[in-house]
Amino acid sequence: MCGRFDLSETSQRLRAQFRLSVDPAPFISDDVCPTNWPPIIRDLDGQRLATPARWGLIPWFAKDEKVGVRAINARAETIATLPTFRNAFKCRRCIVPATAFYEWAAIPGQKQKRKYRFAAASGELLGIAGLWDRWTRQSTGEVVESFTIITTEPNQLMAPIHDRMPAVLKPVNYDVWLSTDTPPEVAGRLLCPADEEVLTFY
DNA sequence: CCAGACGTTGTT
DNA sequence: GTCTGG
DNA sequence: CCAGACGTTGTT
DNA sequence: GTCTGG
């Protein structure tokens, strides 16, 4: 699973690595949590932009935003059919940029879990597959954009630590993942566990 | 038919 | 123990 | 995901 | 909005 990550990059670096149309607003945190508003990457009106969204997807049909706290992750295996995610999977895919993500594992005999940090072996940013949605608060008309991180099976590096991992996209697939012209069944094939050599951890 | 849920993870 | 907030 | 709280009353 | 459970 993925419940915390690190995003500590300059706007210029974000723009370069994801070929954004403009520099995004600065955002730095080595401890991004659910309900925070990190930037997510989308293709909007022909531009590739990184703009803030709330972590924890609130489905457009939800009556209250509390629904979002339960949807910080979405299983790759079920996004095509679950009501909360299926429309987003068809036409609202995004990339969550991250310097690293964290996983925790219990250590036998110890009370506190150990935290592991996973980063790209290349030193570049990770592009994690996500879905987003737009929700309107009935009482005020306020529009809230939110997102979830897609998880998949662990690769061999992750397996000893955890039974799920975020779906890390290959840079060569960024365009296809973000394009609304890509059919969901094609997009779904991009959500496989990362190759072992892509990540390092400590 | 209406009412209520709509999710993942880890842990038991 | 379990829920809420970040 | 973890950290921190863990309440009631009356009013909208 | 749409599905599930009663």
Image: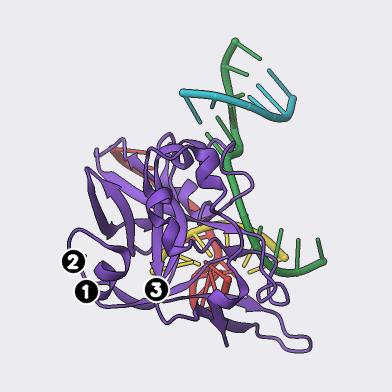
Chain colours: A purple, B green, C yellow, D red, E cyan
Q: Residues within 10 Å of mark 1 (few under 14, many from 20)?
A: some
Q: Name the residue under label 2.
A: A23
Pointer 3 residue: A125
Quarter where residue A36 is shown: bottom left
Give the amino acid at mark 1.
Gln
Q: Residue at x 55, y 77 (%)?
A: A199
Per the image, label 3 sits on a secondary structure element best described as loop
Q: Mark 1 points at which residue?
A: A12
The chain letter for the residue carrying disc 2 is: A
Can marks 1 and 2 be said to lie on one chain?
yes
Please name the residue shown 64% across and 47% down the image: A77
Q: Which amino acid does label 2 sit on?
A: Asp
Within-10-Å neighbours for mark 2: few <14, some 14–19, many 20+: some
Residue A175 in view in this figure = yes
Q: Distance between the residues labelled 3 and 2?
A: 16 Å
- Residue A35 in percent (x, y) is at 40, 61
The Cα atoms of the two marked residues, 1 and 2, are separated by 6 Å
What is the three-letter code of the residue carrying label 3?
Leu
- Whichever of callouts 1 and 3 sits on the residue coming sooner in the sequence is 1
* Furthest residue toward front: A172
